[in-house]
Amino acid sequence: VQLQASGGGLVQAGDSSRLSCAASGRTFGNYALGWFRQAPGKEREFVAGITKSGSNTHYADSVKDRFTISRDNAKNMVWLQMNSLKSEDTAVYYCAAYNAVVINRIPTAVGSYPYWGQGTQVTVSS
């Protein structure tokens, strides 16, 4: 599967923004998806994940109740709705996928996801 993230930009603290990730391939519904981010000088970290059917989601504590991950398997799309943005949310955001045909879960480790999009910058000004 190939992934293409978009939707980043410059926003004000407290604003909302939505990231999109378009996937190619006919078996998108077999993949669990995750959003990660990497701030300057920091390691890439898990933000949110969703199972292949969309029935379960998982969030990092830092974004819980502010961010929402969703997907539409018919459109090969996954989104990250980000509300109440903070300056500490500033980072390059990446969508990632792994084939969940055998094991359907939401891992948080970067190494669990073999497929990655190119990243989109989100800058939150305070």
Image: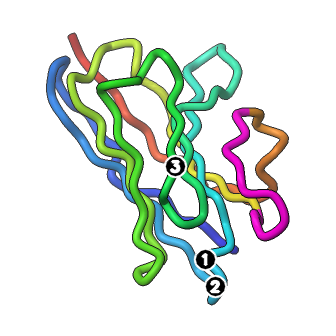
Cα distance, mark 1 to mark 2? 6 Å
For marks 3 and 2, the one nearer the N-term is: 2
Residue 37: in magenta span: no
Instruction: Indicate which label's residue lies in the foreground, 3 or 2.
Output: 3
Q: Is residue 11 above or below residue 79?
A: above
For label 1, the residue is 28
Tell me the tag on residue 25.
Answer: 2
Taking depth in this image into account, of 90 and 30 the one nearest to the observer is 30
Q: Is residue 120 above or below residue 26?
A: above
Predominant SS of the magenta segment: loop
Q: Position of residue 121 (x, y in %)?
A: 43, 39
Residue flagged by tag 3: what amino acid is it? Asn
Cα distance, mark 1 to mark 3? 16 Å
Quarter of the image with the C terminus in it: top left
* Residue lying farthest to the bottom in this orientation: 26
Q: Are marks 3 and 2 in contact (CB under 8 Å)?
A: no
Q: State the extent of the magenta-drawn residues as a range.
A: 99-108
Q: Position of residue 18 (x, y in %)?
A: 28, 47
Can you tell which quarter of the image residue 12 is in? top left
Q: Find numbered disc 1 in the image and state the secondary structure of the residue it sits on.
A: helix
Q: Find numbered disc 3 in the image and state the secondary structure of the residue it sits on.
A: loop
Q: Residue visible at 24% across and 41% down?
A: 17
